[in-house]
Image (cartoon, grey):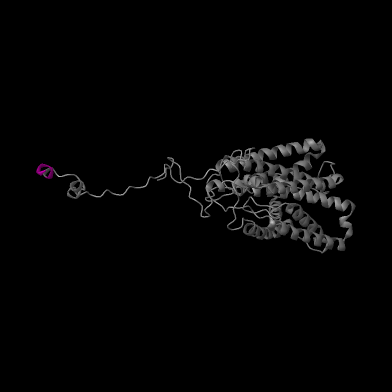
Amino acid sequence: MGYEEAGRERSAEPSSGVPSAVLENVFDDPTHGEPGRDRVGVHLGWEFLLLAGLATVGWLLWQDNPAALRDGNLRTLLVDAVGLGMLALAAGLSLRTAAPNLAVGPIAVAAALHYAEQGDRGLPASIGPAVAVAALGGLALALAVVVLHVPGWAASLAGAAGVVVYIERRSAPVLVQGDYDPGRSAGYLFAGFAAVAALGGLFGMIRTIRRLVGRYRPIADPARRRGAVAAVVTAVALVGSTVLAALAGVLLAANDPGPVAPTSGLDWTVLAIGVALLAGTSAYGRRGGVFGTVLAVSLVTVFQAYAPERGWTLSIWAIGGAALGVGLLVTRLVETFGRPRPGSTDKPEPVGDGTISAGWSIPQAQPVDNWPPTLPTPAAPQPVDPWRDPRWEDSPRRWDADER
């Protein structure tokens, strides 16, 4: 007979037969999921294909117009890649936490308009307010998502509508008033972006960090709350994504010699999320690659430079939609072949000190099904016939003694 605490549901034992204490150290939730480690081979294989595609498109661009990859054109191309990369990082960060931020495009356009109007006041004075407002807006979005526990895409879409209202207050394109030229440090900017993206992917390969970042990912009923830790991580990711989007808008505005058009920016959202999915980030959250963001951003940027050489007129909507469509196929590939192998298990993490210096090992606690232990049931007593008692046969009879 087992005992349960009052008011607490008893979790069912998983079908794999692995104890719950082991499963708690293996994956996100001890009552849901598969035992074992995620497979990263699918990410490395896809990133190899992205590298091959980048080399192919880069070679084609070099054949048609070698000047596009030299001097000032190369620096402009690198800064464009950094701007798109920061948008992709913003989208990918929110995707990894299973709370996609659809407002990254409008936020980038709004920040670009602000910088274009206030750029003559200097770089810190023009960028600082934009980043501060983006952080506060991201905090409001995060509170709406984690406190009300609503889908991130829905809350961020409402936030994007509010940002578009701010953008529509301008009826004409705005010329950039500042003189900041990011092309002078294009190489450093691209190296910094690549380092941040690669380090983020490497840290995301660590099981503990991946489990922490993807904690908001639903496991059963998506309306059920995932705990305070998941809420805090998701809130930080949403604030970070809005700040990255604002910085990306400023960088793209400073790199473009033309005026900043007051568009909705939703096309940039489609492109950013499409590139993040194309990089190998799962649309369901948690899973992602290592170098995929750098390779996907570079591939799309070089393709945008190559398309005019072939006479193709492709809008951001077209490129973003294509990247998004391919990215959804990549998500299915990652979720199918990136999950743990069937039947694989991991050893539980040691409890306490594990091994003492003398060489003795502390035995691991074994799960106890029932407490207190059940005693064996005694057999039912058999009725005794008093006339068949051996005492009547073995003891001396009184009348025999009297006769003697």
Residue ID at (75%, 43%): 247
Q: Position of residue 138 (x, y in %)?
A: 66, 41
Quarter residue 8 falls in: top left
Q: Is residue 18 above or below residue 356?
A: below
Q: Which residues are magenta?
A: 400-404
In magenta stretch: residue 401: yes
Visible residue check, residue 170: no
Pick the residue in front: 354 or 236.
354
Direction from residue 118 to residue 158 in the image, left or right? left
Q: Position of residue 370 (x, y in %)?
A: 43, 45
Residue 269 x/y as whole percent: 69, 51
Q: Residue furthest front?
A: 404
**For residue 146, side relative to residue 45 (left or right):** left
The rendered magenta stretch, by its main secondary structure, is classed as: helix
**Residue 60 visible in image:** yes
Drawn side of residue 99 relative to residue 171, left or right: left
Question: In which quarter of the view is residue 330 placed?
Answer: bottom right
**Whole-percent x and y of residue 208?**
64, 45
- State the residue in front, 254 or 300: 300
Instruction: Identify the image quadrant of the C terminus.
Output: top left
Q: What residue is at 83 percent from the left and 63 percent from the top?
A: 60
